Image (tube, rainbow, N blue to C red):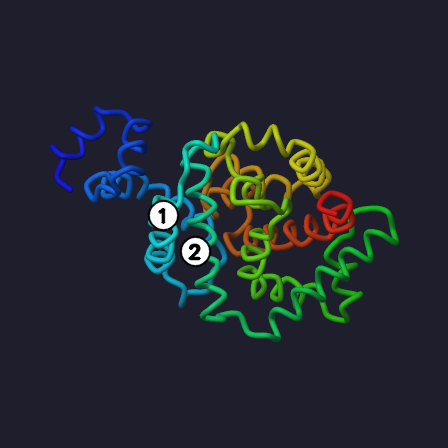
Amino acid sequence: MNNKKYNELDAIGEDKLWEKFIKKNDQDIRDYFVVKYAPLVKYVAGKISMGMPSNIEFDDLVSYGIFGLLDAITKFDPARGIKFKTYAMTRIRGAIFDELRSIDWIPRSIRQKAKQVELVITELENRLGRTVEDEEIARELGVSTEEFQSLLSKLSGTSMLSLNDIWYLGDDSDELSILETLEAPENMNPDILIEKQEIRDYIIDAIKKLPDKEKKVIVLYYYEDLTLKEIGDVLEVTESRVSQLHTKAIMRLRGRLGRIKQNIVG
């Protein structure tokens, strides 16, 4: 789409464009929405790309996400009172994760190990009633601290997939994942957050109880949009250590939230 056509459509206003698109399925309007929201695809792909192995290219994630954006444009219904940006993010993210799962890039042994580590952390913290240290987790796993930290690096990709777990089950407008709650507020629909405030409060409370460095990684990455390298500079640790801290933080969150999820979603 050329700039002149884009500017002409942009001047009409998005609400009126949606009305016209739903009535006529106009290709020019579809193209306008694709161009306008293409940066959203890159934003979502960028978030998901953290910790992915080198064989998973950022451009591939963007390609998967474009299909989600097209699906969102086709199925969006403004009458439901949901902002398109929020609806599209869910569809984009879902398309990327669906494709990642379909290519099955995480070996089964890694999936099993991730579940084992998460279970060990959860059981230890339940038993001791406090946050447990790397040395304690490693001891319970029967490995050295260095081996545990190396394992965390291998498990980093699984933590991103787990963040897409849905916390509230309903129709498309009602779904809420842990990742959506972690994302910066300006990228979210406040109406949905208010409606699901109880769920959000549980997650925010669990984040607050993380160890200091893990909490900082979550805040700096998801709320401040810093890169892994930038976070490493702030915390004075290596980029790989930031990835390890992120993976551990997500495992703690999933373990703690798992204890209350049944009460929320029934």
How many callouts does the rendering have? 2
Name the residue: 28% across, 43% down.
Answer: 34
Above-or-below relation of 153 to 68: below
Relative side of 131 to 49, left or right: right
Image quadrant in which you'd find residue 99 = bottom left
Q: Residues within 10 Å of mark 2 (few under 14, many from 20)?
A: many
Q: Position of residue 102 (x, y in %)?
A: 47, 68
Residue for badge 1: 69
Find out whether the residues at labels 1 and 2 contact each other: C-beta distance under 8 Å: yes
Relative side of 32 to 65, left or right: left
Separation of residues labelled 1 and 2 (CA atoms): 9 Å
Which mark is first along the chain, 2 or 1? 1
User: Residue type at mark 1?
Assistant: Leu
Q: Nearer the viewer, residue 157 or 35?
A: 35
Image quadrant in which you'd find residue 3 = top left
Image quadrant in which you'd find residue 76 = top left
Name the residue: 77% across, 71% down.
Answer: 142
Q: Position of residue 171 (x, y in %)?
A: 55, 45
Q: Position of residue 231 (x, y in %)?
A: 51, 43
Q: Nearer the viewer, residue 111 or 128?
A: 111
Mark 2 secondary-structure assignment: helix
Residue for badge 2: 95
User: Residue type at mark 2?
Assistant: Ala
